[in-house]
Amino acid sequence: MKKTSTRLADGRELIYYDSRDDTVRDAVDRRPLDRTVTTSEVRRDPLLGDAVAIASHRQGRTYHPPADECPLCPSEGDRLSEIPDSSYDVAVFENRFPSLAGDSGRCEVVCFTSDHDASFADLTEEQAGLVLEAWTDRTAELSHLPSVEQVFCFENRGAEIGVTLGHPHGQIYAYPFTTPRTALMLRSLAAHKEGTGGENLFDAVLERELAGERIVLETEHWVAFVPYAAHWPYEVHLYPRRRVPDLLGLDEEARTEFPKVYLELLRRFDRIFDGRDGGEEGAGEPRTPYISAWHQAPFGTLEEFDGVVRDDFALHLELFTIRRTSGKLKFLAGSESGMSVFINDVPPEAAAQRLREVASS
């Protein structure tokens, strides 16, 4: 992998990740951009302890542009985009409309491919491996920023999720705090460790799932399963067999095997409802909308979680869809949005069975 860092016209950082070591990246951003001005502020809810990012500047962000004006496609002629070069393998840049900025963290956009009409599931294993390298490198770099405590790599796919740019891409949020979701995991981890005389909760969960009926697929280095108390209609958790706290901890064997495993999961998601891989126009149900989220240990202090250290945390990926059946979505209504109590219409065992049925032949 070759990494090339440069700057966009308004000063934001842009990083190219190329599979070829001899690739030269010297294109200049020719857009007449002013320096980016953000108003991001993090506020704490005194009752719940949640952090809320107030980012009013995001009201003007790009919203469903036509394909020929996509800001994530390579620049071509007079059509100038966020990517000055005429092609790229993987590109990462600071978000022009960040939810978090400055002392409140940082937001980046990860462009998986220059092909506007592709999806992550269309990538080759080599391309998917390069994205993994980019995620890992950005996690390492962002962890050194003084304002950053936790790094979150994720992808939203589909208009149903709220995606406003159709180009295949994900994001990275570098938070200046430990997120509420992770704090819940750490508290459960601490309580279990104390109550069992030192047993690791993540290890216990993985051991239980391996012995049950919710396994979706397993390989030498990875295990994918539908969790016992799945929140979403189709939800898969992907764990490396060897517990590591973050992407940096993955060994070479796990890195090599990841692209094949992850691409298989994404392709199964596209076959859940109608047995198709693709989302061709006129071919029936569109591709399955999903959220794919990496959970990594915070880089800050864990003193408030008694007895827990970073190595107790288990890196894992959560992949889920809001579609509960063909043509119907799972909405977060009163119980979910008002009281954080999820109601799942699909039994986890049935979801796991379906995801096994749509395996690649």
Image: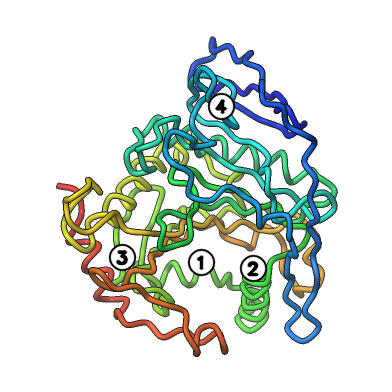
Name the one closer to the observer, 355 or 223.
355
Give the residue displayed 49% in from the left and 35% down from the top.
Answer: 69
Q: Residues within 10 Å of mark 1 (few under 14, many from 20)?
A: some
Q: CA distance from mark 4 to mark 3?
A: 34 Å
Measuring 72% from the left and 63% from the top, which residue is drawn there? 309
Residue 203, labelled with which disc? Answer: 1
Give the residue number, with chain letter if any, for mark 3: 215
Q: Disc 1, disc 2: CB below 8 Å?
A: no
Q: Between label 3 and label 2, give the one nearer the viewer.
A: 2
Q: Nearer the viewer, mark 4 or mark 3?
A: 4
The image's mark for residue 17 is 4
Residue type at mark 4: give it: Tyr
Distance Cα–Cα, label 2 vs label 4? 29 Å
| Amino acid type, residue under disc 1 in the picture | Asp
Determine the residue positioned at 68% across, 24% down: 5
Residue 355, horizontal then vertical, whole percent: 25, 62
Q: Is residue 105 above or below residue 79?
A: below
Which sits earlier in the primary sequence, circle 4 or circle 3?
4
Q: Is residue 240 above or below residue 139?
A: below
Residue holding disc 2: 182
Which amino acid lies under the numbered mark 3 shown in the image of this protein? Ile
Mark found first going from the N terminus, 4 or 1 = 4
Which badge, 3 or 2, comes first in the chain's sequence? 2
